[in-house]
Amino acid sequence: MKKLILSIILFLLVVLAISTPFLSIVRASDETVSIQFANSSINQAFANVLRAEEAGGNVTTLLSKLNSAAALLAEADNAYNSGLLTNVTSYADNARLIADQVNGDSLTLLNSSIAESKNSFLSTMLFSTVAIALLVIALLLTWRRLKRAYTKKLLNLKPEIVENGV
Amino acid sequence: MEFKQKRATIISIGLIGILLLASPTIALFIKMPASQHFSDLYILGSNHTFDGIPFNIIAGQTYSLYLGVGNHMGSSEYYTCVVKMGNESASPPNSTLKTVSPLPALYDYKTFVTDGATYEAPLTFQVDQITFNDSMSQLSSIAINGIEYSTNLYSAWNSNRTGYYYNLFVELSTYNSTLSTTQYNDRYVRLILNMTQ
């Protein structure tokens, strides 16, 4: 019986010894997956922030948050490259959480920026159209007045009598 | 004033006025020609100048630098600066093919920089393990910003320049949101380090 228990323990130790490198590979791939997810989330969030910026939105706060996410992702990368795998997943997961939040915020900002830019475009067009119309009306009225004054002036002119020396 | 002159004045005022009042709308349609877009990457010494950039390196001593990135791209950018270490013959990034150096990445910085802004961060390094033997040196580990990286780099004695030389590269990449990929920005800095015994 003792021999059986001893052989089972020995077998388990051998299995553990053999599987340790594979476990570390699996673990390493877990870290890689976390980093990839975080990287993808940050890239997606930045693409939306950029669209919001192009639409005229103020993205300072969003970029500041994204910088926090990027710093965490860099820490995850650096720890992974140095072989210190302990905190890699937590750094990467925190980076992904921040990036996902920024992603949502950036979509809201993008929609409001597009609406604002449409309003701004329409109000500028309206301003130009109304102002030009008013200017044209004012100039036409001035022109009519001027023309009338000139005609009146012409009508009021007394004909000059030229005497011919016969 | 003659009638014809008055008419000309009114027409002139009308045309200039229309142009001025239409200019806000015209500005929405006309895009001004863009200035040259570029990013810059630089390294400064510990006092934020070009003085104090290390050359002769002693094992165990910490060297402090500043890494800077400037954005003149016309919009916000996502930058990645990768620090790499190589021996004297290590290939630098290829400017023709616009590819990064094949050396393994050690430390990286990731940052978002708005247009016209500059990012600066400390870059410290310390050579922890270097051995010299028969005109050959072996750099086994280097600490960058306090994180230890094992390297397995060899550099032979350079009799012309009298030293064991290594290169520290910093490469700049930007994220291209159109192509959804990070691309090498064709900017890198190289520090030539002479390892002394």
Image: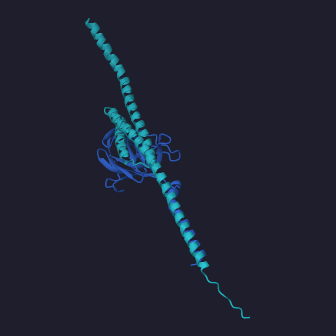
Chain colours: A cyan, B blue
For the point 41% across and 46% down, the residue is: B169
For the point 54% across and 67% down, the residue is: A141
Please provide percent x and percent y for residue B154. 40, 40
For residue B4, side relative to residue B54 (left or right) = right
Q: How many labels does the image show?
A: 0
Picture layout, residue A48 above or below residue A162: above
Residue A70 is at least partly visible in this image:
yes
Residue A50 is at least partly visible in this image:
no
For residue A28, side relative to residue B35 (left or right) = left
Picture layout, residue A21 above or below residue B41: above
Please provide percent x and percent y for residue B56. 35, 50
For the point 35% across and 40% down, the residue is: A69
Please provide percent x and percent y for residue A70. 37, 41
Quick one: B159 or A112, which is closer to the camera? A112
For residue B102, side relative to residue A75 (left or right) = right
**Quadrant position of the C terminus of chain A in the picture:** bottom right
Quick one: A74 or A143, which is closer to the camera? A143
Residue that sits furthest to the bottom in the current view:
A166
Question: Which image quadrant for residue A163?
Answer: bottom right
Please provide percent x and percent y for residue B152. 38, 37
Quick one: B184 or B146, which is closer to the camera? B184
Residue that sits furthest to the right in the current view:
A166
Residue that sits furthest to the left in the current view:
A2
For the point 50% across and 47% down, the residue is: B95
**Quadrant position of the N terminus of chain A in the picture:** top left
Quick one: B42 or A36, which is closer to the camera? A36
